[in-house]
Amino acid sequence: MAAALRPQHRTPWLRSSRFSLLALVLALTSAQIARAQQADPGDPSQQAPAADNTSSVPPSADPPSRVARLSVAQGSVSVEPASVNEFSPAELNDPLTTGDRIWADNGAEAELEAGQLAVRVGEATDLTVTAMTDTLAQFGLAQGSIHLRSFALDAGTTTEIDTPNVAVTVLQPGDVRVDVDPNGDTTIVTLLSGQVEVDGNGLQQTLQPGQRISLAGTNPVSAQWLQPAANDGLDSFSQDRDQFYQSAESSEDSYVNPDTVGSADLQQYGDWEPDTDYGEVWYPNNVAVGWQPYCYGHWTWIAPWGWTWIESEPWGFAPFHYGRWGQFGGRWGWIPGPPVVHPVYSPGLVVFVHPGNGITAWFPLGPREPYAPWYQASTLYLNRVNVSSIYSRDASQVRTIYNTANRPIYANPLGAQQHFANRSIATVAVPQSSFAAGGSIASARLHLSAAQLSAAAVLPHPMVSPERSMVAPGTARSVPPRINRPALATHQETGPRPGAPPESPTQATVHQGSGTQAQPAPIERHGANPPQSAYPPSTVQGGVRPPSPVHGTEQLPAANNGGENARQQPSNPAPPQGTLYNRAVPPPPRPSFDQQRQAIQNTDPGRPLETQQLNNLRENRPVGQPQQREPAPHPAPEPRSAPPAPRSSPPPPAPRSNNNRR
């Protein structure tokens, strides 16, 4: 990924030659890594130990390396997961991915953050994340208003907003506002900075900063240029979030890759301090006495990753889906991965263990301990999810491992590796019933004796399948007027590409105005909101004369045809209500949660379905057995009539500020 990285600022001790190289992988020497990188790919004897048979999994089957995070939820905000046709109250730090839907009620505001991309959601807005993959970020706006703020665009990626009558594609990073009226037949696009292209039936137009256009109807779409509008509450909210990110950018220095979702919150809730072995370490402030990671939150189920951790603290996203946790002088600190490569999202960087007796337990991975995904993944993914989260000063070695696809670099963390730094000091245990239902971990936590801890076997994943209450935890206070999910009607791209002259003689053109147009300002990640520029107030057809032509149906009289001064209407009918006009094709919809749960229960309890199994479900075929071998054996599932769990430990103390300081 070609993400823009911040300048590298290092303290003098970091430049010391005696710290120039640091081993990345426990149980692998530098010679082993070099041999794994340089050996003949066809010689199995020279390959590094594999975590499992991931080489048989194609990278195309890997889960995406990014998600969107619900970073702000003010007022009544509801979410409808992709596999559940039911709205529940939204929760801060919820990971959102393909198919998830958000509703912000009257007076509510929300923000979705996805690294270099942020979507600010206004009141009475129905928004669907129609695709969140490594190459496509696509949002469906059925009604309401959003600001889409992009700080950088990677080569080969697409960012698109779909409405009932047009698709808006980001061509240059910046700030675009899109409004859709409740009836879904009018879209207003306002470009504050950057560049976007608007496509609809019979229309294609590239917008420049300061332009505002209204697009009405579906077949055809008619365009009308509008005057700039006064700022409202959503504009102010978006500007406040820009200032927040700008402040975080200046304070984070070069410690974290800017694509790390949630990293902007760290400066407000903790401090960075240098460590001899691990560089800059982040320590949270104002946490409860006895606080430890992966204890104050709950587990949920999000396909295709499966078990996913949701931390309760407002800063609790980046430190639980990237990097590693360690204890330093009796306090917990988070170590980010190297900032030189694009970070790969993980649902939870933990190891599960099996104490038996109806208990599920886990502990966080330590600083140099590799992660074994409990979901389907290729060798390339395994290397990337680890090297992007394990600290190293050797940027060249990090990049080499990041691009190694023909052999696993990391030793089997659940096989030969039996010692874990955090196992004896940070194991968290709860009854399986609480875990499966997505209940609060802190309130259900159990005490494990030293004997139980030492005897607990390492598991590739929990041996318990999720309950439906995990993904639909409660009834939402408000839902959108249209309960049914918006549907996508994909249209093949037609007409000239941006900047090309019109090719069809039927395309009308609005003559360009003579005034000058403000040029788009350079966009810096988390930079200040650029000023709104204006174009000359020369009116045409009830609007403002645009400084660039519109190719399509922009409310001009059509050419005389048989004595009739009327436009010839297309023969194709208008799309049904609730349909979104889109150009990019999103991934196929996910099978329902109930289908997935039953299939998981019958094949491998607690393990997410593989790609082929999901395809079988979509096509109403037998789900079949998983093809990928797990990295460690696990015991048979316990009967539902398991013996009573041990007595719960006393509830955790009320949060009390100790600043987590020495």
Image (cartoon, rainbow, N blue to C red):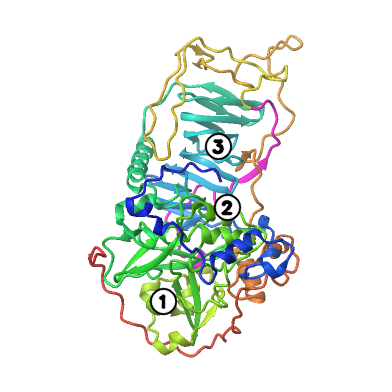
**Residue 592 appears anywhere in the view:** no
Q: Is residue 258 magenta?
A: no
Amino acid type at mark 3: Gly
Residue 441 vs residue 571, the one in the foreground: 441
Secondary structure beneath label 1:
strand
Find the residue positioned furthest to the front: 17
The residue that appears at 47% across and 78% down in the rendered structure is 419
Secondary structure beneath label 2:
loop
The magenta stretch is 470-497
Amino acid type at mark 2: Thr
Q: How many marks?
A: 3
Reading the chain from its start, which is encountered first: label 1 or label 3?
3
Magenta span: chief secondary structure: loop
**Residue 135 appears anywhere in the view:** yes
Quickly name the residue at label 3. Answer: 184
Quickly name the residue at label 2. Answer: 98
> Where does the C terminus fall, quadrant-wise?
bottom left
Is 441 rendered above or below residue 153? below
Q: CA distance from mark 1 to mark 3?
A: 49 Å
Amino acid type at mark 1: Val
**Residue 493 x, y percent position in the rendering:** 69, 33
**Residue 535 x, y percent position in the rendering:** 45, 17
Residue 250 vs residue 186, the one in the foreground: 250
Name the image quarter holding residue 59: bottom right
Is 469 rendered above or below residue 216? below
